[in-house]
Image (tube, helix red, strand yellow):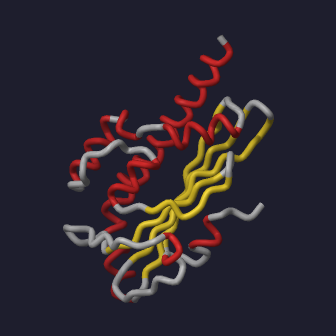
């Protein structure tokens, strides 16, 4: 099965994948992806404040307020979001862009990030939820800069994504329990 993220960042320099199994059907998991607020995690709130990100609801919708763009969605299956910036700088150098500009963007000295959340049915009552993050640098200099930055923040970045999976799993399983009662 081809993933939507492959259409937006098929070639990349860095990547990381995390996954969890959720005891809920894929459509419930996907709905939870859209509804889940990462801000429910004290760890995530702390890490966002440490990076001086603006306060907002940390949902798929809220992430768009801090520069992420929703690039694509496949109903009940996958969403793909993107971000372009100089993340290794104190301001993060996040560029505003339109989703249709993401693939062709090649401004020197930047990094393009694509991330997805993918709900893969295992059975009719269980789903594998996967998040993959890919980074493509647009110059040798940005690749070196990002590599240094990534070596420092990768554990924390991974922690945020694992927390997101945990919260989505919790949201989906709770939603399913409430619908059964």
Specify the quadrant that holds the N terminus: bottom right
From the viewer's perspective, tell me whether residue 121 is left or right of residue 130: right
Residue drawn at x 38%, y 59% as measured from the top left: 154
Residue drawn at x 27%, y 68% as measured from the top left: 92
Residue 178, quarter of picture:
top right
Up/down of 89 relative to 165, above or below: below
Residue 54: percent from the left, percent from the top?
24, 52
Up/down of 31 relative to 179, above or below: below
Specify the quadrant that holds the C terminus: top right
Q: Residue furthest top?
A: 181
Q: How many marks?
A: 0
Residue drawn at x 68%, y 45% as measured from the top left: 76
From the viewer's perspective, tell me whether residue 91 is left or right of residue 127: left
Residue 157: percent from the left, percent from the top?
39, 54
Residue drawn at x 29%, y 41% as measured from the top left: 45
Residue 7: percent from the left, percent from the top?
64, 72
Residue 90, quarter of picture:
bottom left
Residue 173: percent from the left, percent from the top?
60, 26
């Amino acid at each position: 099965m081809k993933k939507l993220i492959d259409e937006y960042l098929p070639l990349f320099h860095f990547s990381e994948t995390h996954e969890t199994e959720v005891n809920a059907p894929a459509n419930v998991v996907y709905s939870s992806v859209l509804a889940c607020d990462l801000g429910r995690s004290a760890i995530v709130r702390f890490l966002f404040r440490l990076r001086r990100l603006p306060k907002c609801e940390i949902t798929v919708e809220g992430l768009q307020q801090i520069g992420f763009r929703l690039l694509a969605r496949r109903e009940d299956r996958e969403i793909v979001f993107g971000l372009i910036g100089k993340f290794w700088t104190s301001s993060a150098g996040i560029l505003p862009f339109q989703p249709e500009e993401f693939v062709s963007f090649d401004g020197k000295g930047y990094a393009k990030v694509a991330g997805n959340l993918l709900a893969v049915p295992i059975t009719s009552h269980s789903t594998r939820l996967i998040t993959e993050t890919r980074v493509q640098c647009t110059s040798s200099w940005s690749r070196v800069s990002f590599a240094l930055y990534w070596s420092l923040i990768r554990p924390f970045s991974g922690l945020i994504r694992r927390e997101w999976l945990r919260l989505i799993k919790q949201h989906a399983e709770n939603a399913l329990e409430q619908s059964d009662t």
